[in-house]
Image (cartoon, rainbow, N blue to C red):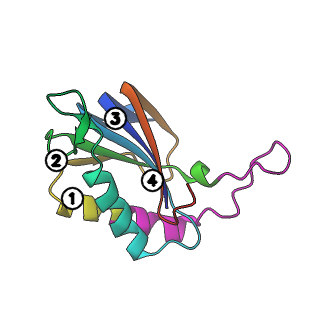
Amino acid sequence: MRAVVQRVSEASVDVGGERVSEMGEGLLVLVGVGLRDTDRDAGLLARKIVGLRIFEDEDGKMNRSLADVNGTLGLVSQFTLWADVRKGRRPSFGQAAPPDLAGPLFEKVVAHAEALGVPVVTGRFRARMDVSLVNAGPVTVLLDTERVF
């Protein structure tokens, strides 16, 4: 699984003009599920995200996690994280998991994160979403459960 983790002061997701989720301080995470991903990846990704120490402590160091700041986790499925543009200019999505595999694995990430005790909001799987956020810092971190980067 791949993820783009963004520390935010606020974020929201709209689908067709309807607000489906909103949050204050926390992490907004775009999640891409790949063909080889399993339940193990879902748990690993959730634990890594919730435990990331990317919030500042009283000394201004990134030393606090989402739980430490009582933040919210926003999870948005985004298959385009698997885009391959090494050849040509049109992205190939051959390594992205199909919806029947990606949907349940994305929901497992949500469930694992909730089990870790943080509030979770989500977008709508397979919907065309308008995602708005205020990136605080800015702080953006890339994760990959296969540790490609």
Q: Please, what is the three-letter code of the amino acid marked with disc 2?
A: Ala
Per the image, is 72 magenta? no
Separation of residues labelled 3 and 4 (CA atoms): 22 Å
Q: Earlier in the sequence, mark 4 or mark 2?
A: 2
Q: Can see residue 79?
A: yes
* Label 1 environment density (alpha carbons within 10 Å; few <14, some 14–19, many ≥20): some
Kindly report which numbered mark, 1 or 2, lies closer to the viewer in this rendering.
2
Residue 60 in picture, x, y percent from top left: 23, 27
**Total marks drawn?**
4
Q: Earlier in the sequence, mark 1 or mark 3?
A: 3
Secondary structure beneath dot 2 equals: loop
Residue 75 in picture, x, y percent from top left: 36, 48
Q: Earlier in the sequence, mark 1 or mark 4?
A: 1
Q: Residue at x 58, y 50 (%)?
A: 81
* Label 4 environment density (alpha carbons within 10 Å; few <14, some 14–19, many ≥20): some
Disc 2 designates what residue?
67
Q: Please, what is the three-letter code of the amino acid marked with disc 3?
A: Arg
Taken as a whole, is the magenta stretch helix, strand or loop? loop
Tell me: 102 left or right of 52.
Answer: right
Towards the viewer: 22 or 34: 34
Secondary structure beneath dot 4 equals: loop
Q: Are marks 4 and 2 in contact (CB under 8 Å)?
A: no
Q: Residue at x 26, y 53 (%)?
A: 51
Relative height, residue 139 to residue 85 (above, below): above
Tell me: 3 left or right of 108.
Answer: right
Relative height, residue 121 to residue 140 (above, below): below
Disc 4 designates what residue?
125
Separation of residues labelled 1 and 3 (CA atoms): 18 Å
Separation of residues labelled 3 and 2 (CA atoms): 13 Å
Relative height, residue 7 to residue 137 (above, below): below
Q: Earlier in the sequence, mark 1 or mark 2?
A: 2
